[in-house]
């Protein structure tokens, strides 16, 4: 099956606002129907070879349990936790998904960080993405596979807001979100299947 034959946006998308203040986060729900999301998950897993990256945290070199890969336009670099990465060439699946995201959001992106979580024992702690994209820029997060909880915590009030990221779903963070809110993907022993996450950015 070609990319063109299953490239179809779900017409039942109903975007909703997640944050009431100090940021702009929109959850679109699933962009595709179940069958299309299943095909994308299968194709992404067969074409993307993630690696267990090493990062410096609190002065120590740590090997991350999740697998990552970075794709993007020629000539850009990505700085993350003290490391500088050069992107791989876009795959046709990533470009098709990017096209869907850009249609829905009205934003454009030149790179994509891919995270592969084998199960709920792998996650990400509280952090912001301001380091790599700067203030105010849009990050579009697309999830395939296991449904996972995603949390936001205000840096001053400590208010916490959560959203369940569904198979084939899109979450967009814009404006002052990275300044005022941290986010995390908490671990969960209840989740026993794989999830792949694509975060489209403009570096």
Image: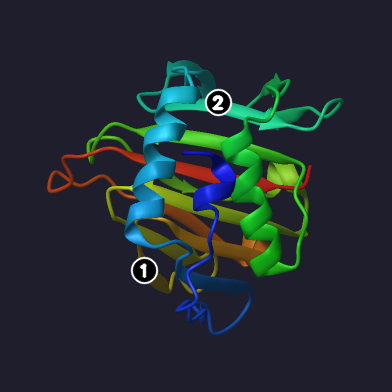
Q: Position of residue 57 (x, y in %)?
A: 51, 26
Check residue 69 in the rendering and tell me which mark sits there, or answer none.
Answer: 2
Q: Residues within 10 Å of mark 2 (few under 14, many from 20)?
A: some
Decide if residue 147 is in sight here. Answer: yes
Rendered location of residue 177, percent (x, y): 63, 66
Q: What colouring method underlies this structural image? A: rainbow
Q: Earlier in the sequence, mark 2 or mark 1?
A: 2
Q: What's the residue at 34%, 47% (across, down)?
A: 38
Instruction: Tell me if label 2 and label 1 are in contact, CB under 8 Å.
Output: no
Along the viewing direction, whichever of 23 and 179 lies nearer the viewer: 23
Answer left or right for 74 relative to 71: right
Regarding mark 2 in the picture, which secondary structure is present there?
Answer: strand
Of residues 111 and 63, the one nearer the viewer is 111
Above or below: residue 41 compared with residue 20: above
Q: Quadrant of residue 140?
A: bottom right
The quadrant of the picture occupied by the C terminus is top right
Camera-nearest label, 2 or 1: 2
Neighbours of disc 1 within 10 Å: few (<14), some (14-19), many (20+): some
Residue in the picture at 59% in, 49% down: 97
Q: CA distance from mark 2 to mark 1?
A: 26 Å
Residue located beneath label 1 in the image:
162
Measured as percent of width and height from the top left, residue 121 is found at 22, 36
């Amino acid at each position: 099956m070609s990319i063109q034959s299953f490239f179809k946006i779900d017409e039942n998308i109903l975007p909703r606002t997640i944050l009431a203040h100090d940021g702009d986060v929109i959850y679109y729900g699933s962009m595709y129907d179940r069958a299309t999301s299943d095909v994308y998950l299968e194709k992404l897993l067969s074409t993307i070879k993630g690696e267990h990256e090493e990062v410096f945290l609190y002065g120590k070199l740590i090997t991350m349990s999740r697998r990552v890969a970075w794709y993007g336009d020629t000539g850009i670099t990505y700085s993350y936790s003290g490391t500088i990465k050069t992107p791989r060439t876009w795959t046709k699946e990533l470009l098709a998904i990017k096209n869907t995201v850009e249609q829905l959001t009205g934003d454009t992106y030149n790179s994509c960080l891919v995270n592969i979580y084998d199960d709920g024992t792998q996650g990400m702690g509280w952090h912001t993405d301001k380091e790599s994209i700067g203030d105010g820029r849009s990050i579009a997060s697309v999830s395939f596979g296991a449904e996972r909880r995603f949390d936001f915590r205000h840096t001053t009030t400590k208010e916490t807001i959560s959203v369940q990221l569904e198979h084939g779903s899109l979450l967009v963070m814009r404006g002052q979100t990275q300044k005022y809110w941290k986010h995390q993907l908490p671990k969960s022993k209840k989740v026993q299947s794989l999830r792949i996450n694509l975060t489209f950015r403009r570096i």
